[in-house]
Image (cartoon, grey):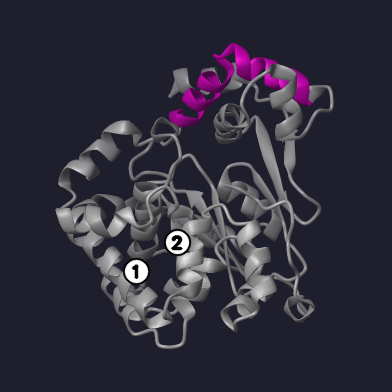
Amino acid sequence: MAIPAKLHRNQAQRAAKPTRLEVDWGLAYEALVGLVMFTGEENETSYEVGSDWFRSARRKASPELRAAAKAFKGSGHVFNGLAGLIRSVEGRSVAAFVERLRSDRIGDVQRALLGHHTNMLDLVDAALRGDATAKREYLEQSHARSLERRIIEADPRDVAKEVAALVELWDRDIFAELAPGLEPGLKESWRTISRLKGTLPTERLMIRATRGVEYRVEAWIHTVVLVPTQLNRPWVTLAEHRGTKIIFYPAVAAGEGADAQLADVYKALGDETRLRILRLLASGVTSLTDIAERLGLAKSTVHGHMVILRAAGITRSVVGEGGKGYVLNERPDLNSLLDSFLKG
């Protein structure tokens, strides 16, 4: 979940109304999440599905899928912005999503890929109109410069067809087999958060759904959409599309017991590095960079530890307006948690 340090803000995008909160779900969202994982570069062991899931996907992938994914390998994050297009498809099905991609004639897919997860749409629009300065500035901030240069310079219809073919192959070879096992948990999590929507303030509901991510809405965002995902657990992923922030939160797997919270807490506390991180947070250190420097660790390593602490409810991440950082939650009552489990 990378939040850009520098944002290009178009004043016309600033929200004139209070932020609207929606809760959505669909197999097309989960297929997209899986494709981001398959083509991305995150440490495979950082996902709850583990390395076995990735090995299985690579083994089942056809030569056609491997060839289509190769063009995006290591840059799966560019697909995040496509989540905004899923909101317009019937039933949020994968087939309808593929058709939406394939039928694009006006560059929606191209624009979504280039505007993934950041608020740089003013630069994107200018670059696509042929503004060389905007194109250069955008690419200077890109994390996948060669890929995004290719996307900027391509015919938007060709980009849409390429992405549609990749999603279709991903569904055919990998995701269609996974979907039946994922659907019950996604529905259950969607229903749970939907029921809470009318009983909790927006900020508290987002923290509850994400298990500890406090999103402070930026001025240009008019809608926040919460979407459950199982494949991406325990990560929380944020994406943007035309003034909408889409937050993929960890779904509760169907049939998962309440004792999972107890296991998460003890797992989080059963590591010396994470205990040292908690001591730093208690002393007022909040940024990923500062924590990494004080512990002499890579930021990616610290980030992985923070995901575990957040999932256990011990800390929470703060992102959005005003920057980002980490803060402590109230300490869990370990005796109470254990007693509750033992009395079952």
Instruction: Look at the image and give the residue range highlighted in magenta.
Output: 259-281
105 over 13 or under it: above or below: below
Distance from disc 2 to disc 1, alpha carbons, whole Å, reads 9 Å
Q: Which residue is mark 1?
A: 163
Nearer-the-camera pick, 108 or 312: 108
Q: How dense is the environment of label 1, judged by Cα within 10 Å: few (below 14), some, or many (20 and up)?
A: many
Question: What is the x, y in percent for residue 321?
Answer: 77, 57
Q: Is residue 131 visible?
A: yes
Q: Quadrant of residue 128?
A: bottom right
Find out whether residue 277 is within the magenta segment. yes
Residue reaching furthest to the right: 284
Nearer-the-camera pick, 185 or 37: 37
Q: Which residue is mark 2?
A: 79
Question: What is the x, y in percent for residue 313?
Answer: 61, 33
Q: Residue at x 60, y 48 (%)?
A: 2
- State which tag comes first along the sequence, 2 or 1: 2
Image quadrant holding the C terminus, namely top left
